[in-house]
Image (cartoon, coloured by chain):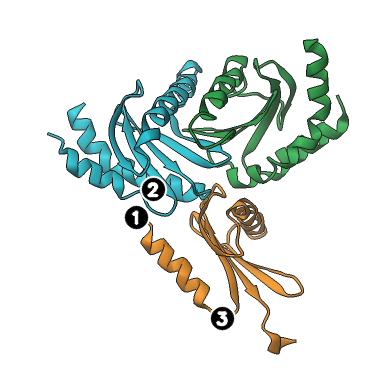
């Protein structure tokens, strides 16, 4: 089974260099695991991130050929949120940095680490 | 539709590696200007239903306590789409998976001065 | 998670006359910056490197040096990554 403490530990590794929160959510937006500084905002962020992801993800399936959504970056005046899919869950980084390359690299690394263990429980 | 606006967006299309088309639409996804390098518009990213998805997404994203949403970047397996919030307009850029997103974003602030005439047209239509 | 990257950027800044560094991915999105370099510049730097590489497509990516009166920017592409170093021109050269 999945060890919650280990999972949070893995998520917390991304919380450096401008990344404030790392969230793992269900595709309906419920928060499964969280690591970061602003617990208060986490529920709102996760609900919105999953909503936006789902809206855009479905367009990738509507076309003639399948074109799955790999990453989604929401760029706001005060920071950024990057979302990707891991197994059937969503991984989400909440950051104040504008280094999108770093955010992409970080979320890709986390995805790679989490894919196998999460696949086995879902 | 002024040639100046067309010229500006065509120059972006030519300069940015991997970029294929640009669409200016209103918030319902009705296109006001469509430009493409090869006059082809891919299925993904250019349909009205896709364009209008941004309207809801940008309003929701502005409530994440990170301030107003500026843009959304989408990396699909074989295409990259960038949508800019220039309310009441939406600017959508569609390119290949290797589009130079960073280069494209440097133009995001320059876009504003070319949109005034579209905004005026929209406002007149609303009255 | 990115401590190695930070080390690389910091050690590049230690070099004499260096006033800024930037590393970006192949989509022009920056991994990190130091000094005067702005993460927004990642796109242009990658674009310049890609464009210059077209001159001799069969050779390795070139090193590009942009010179102004007081500073120079050295751009080089390595695989999927592009790096830029901003330098102040040393006084002795004048």
Q: Position of residue A62 (x, y in %)?
A: 48, 16
Crowding at mark 1 (Cα within 10 Å: few <14, some 14-19, many 20+) = few
Tags 2 and 3 on a common chain: no
Picture disc at residue C16: 3
Q: Which residue is mark 2?
A: A106
Q: Tell me the CA gap for discs 1 and 3.
A: 28 Å
Q: Is residue A81 above or below residue C40?
A: above
Contact between marks 1 and 2 (CB within 8 A): the answer is: yes
Q: What kind of element bears circle 1?
A: loop
Picture disc at residue C1: 1
Q: Tell me the CA gap for discs 2 and 3.
A: 31 Å
Please identify the residue farthest to the left as the structure is shown.
A1
Q: Is residue A9 above or below residue A117?
A: below
Q: Colour of chain B?
A: green
Quarter of the image where one finds residue B90: top right
Q: Is residue B37 above or below residue B110?
A: above
* Viewport quadrant of the N terminus of chain B: top right
- Report the label total: 3
Q: Colour of chain A?
A: cyan
Of the pair B86 and C85, the residue shown nearer to us: B86
- Identified at 64% across, 52% down, the residue is C47
Question: Sequence-wise, which precedes: disc 1 or disc 3?
Answer: 1
Q: Colour of chain C?
A: orange
Q: Position of residue B51 (x, y in %)?
A: 61, 21
């Amino acid at each position: 089974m999945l060890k919650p403490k280990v999972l949070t530990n893995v998520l917390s590794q991304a919380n450096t260099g401008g990344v404030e929160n790392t969230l793992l959510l269900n595709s309906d937006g419920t928060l499964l695991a969280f690591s970061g500084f602003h617990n208060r905002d986490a529920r709102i962020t996760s609900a919105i991130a999953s909503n936006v992801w789902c809206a855009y993800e479905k367009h990738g399936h509507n076309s003639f050929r399948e074109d799955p959504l790999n990453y989604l970056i929401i760029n706001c005046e005060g920071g950024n949120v990057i979302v990707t899919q891991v197994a059937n869950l969503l991984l989400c980084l909440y950051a104040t940095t504008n280094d999108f390359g770093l955010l992409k690299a970080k979320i890709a690394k986390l995805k790679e680490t989490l894919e196998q263990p999460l696949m086995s429980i879902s | 539709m002024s040639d100046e606006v067309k010229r500006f967006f065509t120059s972006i299309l030519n300069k940015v590696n991997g970029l294929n088309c640009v669409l200016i639409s209103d918030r319902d996804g009705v296109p006001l200007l469509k430009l493409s390098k090869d006059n082809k518009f891919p299925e993904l990213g250019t349909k009205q239903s896709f364009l209008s998805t941004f309207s809801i997404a940008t309003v929701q994203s502005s409530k994440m306590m990170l301030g107003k949403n500026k843009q959304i970047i989408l990396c699909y397996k074989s295409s990259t789409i960038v949508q800019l919030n220039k309310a009441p307009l939406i600017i959508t850029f569609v390119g290949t998976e290797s589009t130079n997103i960073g280069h494209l974003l440097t133009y995001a602030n320059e876009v504003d001065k070319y949109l005034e005439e579209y905004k005026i047209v929209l406002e007149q239509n609303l009255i | 998670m990115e401590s190695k990257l930070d080390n690389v950027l910091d050690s590049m800044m230690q070099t004499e006359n260096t006033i800024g560094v930037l590393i970006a991915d192949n989509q022009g999105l920056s991994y990190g910056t130091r000094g005067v370099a702005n993460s927004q510049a990642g796109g242009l730097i990658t674009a310049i490197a890609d464009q210059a590489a077209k001159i001799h497509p069969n050779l390795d990516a070139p090193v590009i040096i942009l010179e102004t009166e007081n500073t120079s920017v050295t751009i080089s592409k390595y695989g999927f990554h592009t790096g830029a170093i901003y330098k102040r021109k040393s006084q002795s050269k004048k």
